[in-house]
Each structure stands twice: as structure tokens, then as C-alpha cells.
Image (cartoon, grey):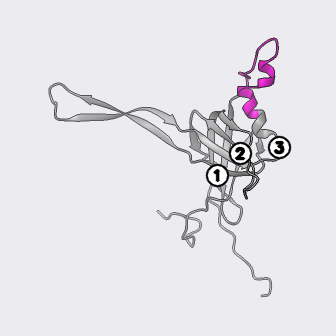
């Protein structure tokens, strides 16, 4: 089977620099880096007493690694608002002491990958995600030459490739002078 059935002229994989992340039905502004999607299945070992030289292996529990998301600091409060649903210092100091939004701190999110022409070529749905680590601002350095960044670590209970995203025929360029 060809790597790209609708685009057999394509010789290279999709680039890793065209992507978007979406939660609550909206794209999140300014995201510059998303960590890899990774899962691990533990191995269960079993040996029969009558055959001590052979060890049988079977799949055990599967766990999904946390996903790190980074973006430049801006006025958009999207990261902070989600992180505050897990712990909000303002509400922890109130008389009720309630500091976690148990009803809606988990979100289903989507990561979309685009080709060089801006066509969506892949999407992954991440389930029951929540923020376990939030960095409001990176180190500040008066002698530095970098942007101030925000980051969050997102825990999740699984992900899968979105089967509704299909390969599209890539556009061709028409020379306007011909």
C-alpha cells in the first residue's frame, strides 16, 4: 500500500510545525509546541510450574503519558482558566474552602495536523484530559533573548486517531503567467 494513496507524488512525511489544538469547541491561540502522544502497555509474565524454561507474556494495563503544551504569554486567559479548575487559590481562601471544579475540570481535546497547503491531514481525540502542572510564566531574564512562555502538562485517559479525517488530494500550483 502506498504511503499517500491520493497523493502518490508526495515523497516526504507531513511536517511537524503545522498544527492546532482545540478544546471547548475553540482553537487555542498561540500554541507553539505540543508534546508527543505516547502510551505504554505493561507486560504480564506467567510461567507454568511444569515448564520452568518458558515464560509466557500477555498485555496488561495500558497507561497514557502526559502531554505538554506550550505557548507564548499573551492576554488570552485560556490556559489559566483551565488550570484554575483543578486548583484556584482565590476560592481556596474563601469561607467554603472549595478550590476544585469537579464538575468540569476534565475536557476532551483535539490535536489537528496540517500539510504544507493548510489541509487537515490528521487529528487525534484526547479523552478526559485535565491540567496537572501549569507554568504561568517562564523564567524572566533581562539579559536574555527569548519570549516569555506558558506551559501546562495535561493528563489524559486515552487518545485515538480521528477516523473522520481523510486524506485529501493535495492542490497543484497554477502559474498565473501561463
Which residue, given by chain and number where applicable, does mark 2 sit on?
138
How many other residues sit within 10 Å of disc 1, few (<14), some (14-19) or many (≥20)? few
Q: Magenta-highlighted stretch: main secondary structure?
A: loop
Would residue 123 appear left or right of 26 to someone viewing this image?
left
Which residue, given by chain and number where applicable, does mark 1 sit on?
165
Q: Residue 114 versus residue 70: which sits nearer the camera?
A: 70
The alpha-carbon separation of the residues under discs 1 and 3 comes to 29 Å
Q: Secondary structure at mark 3?
A: loop
Instruction: Pick the quarter of the image with the C terminus.
Output: bottom right
Q: Nearer the viewer, mark 3 or mark 2?
A: 2
Quarter of the rendering containing residue 84: top right
The alpha-carbon separation of the residues under discs 3 and 2 comes to 16 Å
Magenta stretch?
Answer: 82-104
Which residue, given by chain and number where applicable, does mark 3 sit on?
76
Q: Earlier in the sequence, mark 1 or mark 3?
A: 3
Relative to 108, does residue 27 appear above or below in the rendering?
below
Which residue does the image show at 46% across and 39% down from the upper left?
40
Total marks shown come to 3
Amino acid at each position: 500500500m502506498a504511503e499517500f494513496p491520493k497523493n502518490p507524488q508526495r515523497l516526504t512525511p507531513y511536517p511537524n510545525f503545522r498544527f492546532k489544538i482545540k478544546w471547548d469547541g475553540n482553537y487555542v491561540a498561540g500554541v507553539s509546541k505540543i508534546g508527543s502522544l505516547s502510551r505504554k502497555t505493561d507486560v504480564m509474565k506467567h510461567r507454568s510450574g511444569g515448564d520452568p524454561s518458558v515464560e509466557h507474556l500477555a498485555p496488561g494495563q495500558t497507561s497514557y503519558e502526559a502531554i505538554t503544551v506550550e505557548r507564548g504569554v499573551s492576554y488570552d486567559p485560556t490556559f489559566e482558566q483551565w488550570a484554575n479548575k483543578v486548583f484556584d487559590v482565590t476560592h481556596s481562601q474563601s469561607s467554603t474552602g472549595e478550590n476544585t471544579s469537579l464538575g468540569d475540570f476534565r475536557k476532551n481535546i483535539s490535536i489537528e495536523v496540517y500539510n504544507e497547503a493548510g489541509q487537515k491531514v490528521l487529528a487525534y481525540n484526547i479523552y478526559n484530559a485535565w491540567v496537572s502542572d501549569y507554568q504561568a510564566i517562564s523564567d524572566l531574564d533581562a539579559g536574555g533573548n527569548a519570549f516569555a512562555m506558558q506551559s501546562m502538562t495535561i493528563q489524559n485517559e486515552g487518545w485515538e486517531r480521528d477516523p473522520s479525517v481523510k486524506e485529501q488530494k493535495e492542490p497543484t500550483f497554477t502559474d498565473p503567467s501561463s
